[in-house]
Amino acid sequence: MAYVARNMAPSWQTWTPAITGVDGSRIGAVLPGKGIFIDRDLKRFGITKRIPGVYESSPIRRLFDRFHHDEVGAITTYDGIINARANGKGDDVVISKSSITTAAGFWYDTFRAGGSPAAGVYDSATAPTDQSTDRSTTGAFSNYLTNPTGSDKKYLIAVGWGATSAHNFAILCDQHTQGGSFRLTVTSAETVASPETTVRQYGPGTNGTGNQIVATVTTARTTPTASNSTITYLDGTGGSSSAVNAMQATTDPVDRCLALPNVGTPFAALASGDIGVRQVSAHTKAATADAAGACAIQIVTPLAFVPGVAANTYIERDAPMNIDGLEELANSSLVIGCLKMLVFANASSLGTMVVFLRTAAG
């Protein structure tokens, strides 16, 4: 988790997604560009050596004390959520996704897996097109959730998951856009005529802060070549930018996240200093084309890092009153986002996957 977090766009000062345990409770936070913070010490797990990018509770708390840091809890907000669940505004859903072929040590996108909700569909037009996505998008986990109304906001309270195969861990995301099909069989720029700009904002930064780029393989890469992938985009401040990532000579099946820069993370590396993305407009593969292959390039916001569990194991906490790790599901005109899950596989198949989301409006 720390490795993935350190390779994310450095937005840790404004956007810190939650890390949850297998029971859905918050155990820390992601510090994009820095690592992860856990609200306990490593020695509690029998770990005596420092892990790069992992910040423990006690040293951070001592810094708070040294600088006389005051934390004021918004107790009324939590009371309001508890009251909302007690008065009909709780919204809990179970997601079931069919198995897809995977391989240990690679990241996969579950958006196109069948099940409930139905399989999502990425754009296949060439030249590539782009679409904004939200709760109404086919394949979104949030298809089964309701939108907030009036002055309410929607909150994610807990995430639970399990699968019939063992996996390392998963990331629950809000997918803002889905662009495809960017072909890997040409070396000229693949340009989107009308690129979409993100509309849902997480955290106190500008639109796009904390957003990441994911490229999901939609046509399998065959006879792959080592080359460069250049993605052109608008950064979190609205400025034009581009990032060059080394593309490995790896045969990639469908639904795998392209390794940009490596198989340890599903997110493409952004240009130095960029802390987010609000629009993707073009992709260039240089200088050698693959025999076959295409990908859908999306903008996503990571919402929760969820540890993996053993095969056929599912755990989730049993009381909605345990409201910790509260996470707002950002909306645009009272429409929440397109939720999906990325999985770091540890088996030859995803297996049947079950995800539980506990939410409330208030």
Image (tube, rainbow, N blue to C red):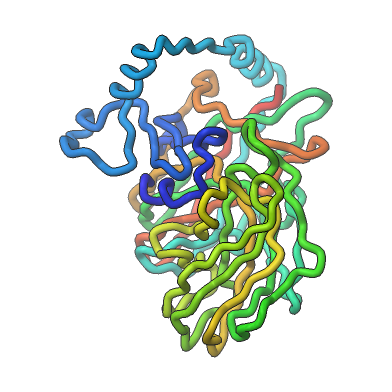
Residue 353 to residue 130: above or below: above
Residue 90 lies, with reference to residue 76, above or below; the image says below
How many numbered circles does the render carry?
Answer: 0
Q: Quadrant of residue 33?
A: top left
Q: Nearer the viewer, residue 353 or 195?
A: 195
Left/right placement of residue 192 relative to residue 98 reads right
In-front residue for pair 333/87? 333
Dividing the picture into quadrants, the one containing residue 327 is: top right
Identify which residue, 171 or 87, lies in the foreground. Answer: 171
Q: Is residue 327 visible?
A: yes
Say whether residue 297 is left or right of residue 62.
Answer: right
| Position in image of residue 66 (x %, y %) | 34, 13
Image spot of residue 63 (x, y percent): 34, 19
Residue occupying image coordinates x 70% and y 42%: 207
Q: Is 148 left, or right, of 227 in this rendering?
A: right
| The C terminus: image quadrant | top right
Q: Is residue 219 visible?
A: no
Measuring 72% from the left and 27% from the top, which residue is drawn there? 153
Image point 60% across, 59% down: which residue?
A: 111
77 or 163, which is in the foreground? 77
Residue at horizontal 72 percent and vertical 42 percent from the top = 200
Give the x, y percent position of residue 176: 69, 51
Residue 257 sits above or below residue 28 on the image: below
Instruction: Name above or below for residue 288 compared with residue 160.
Output: below
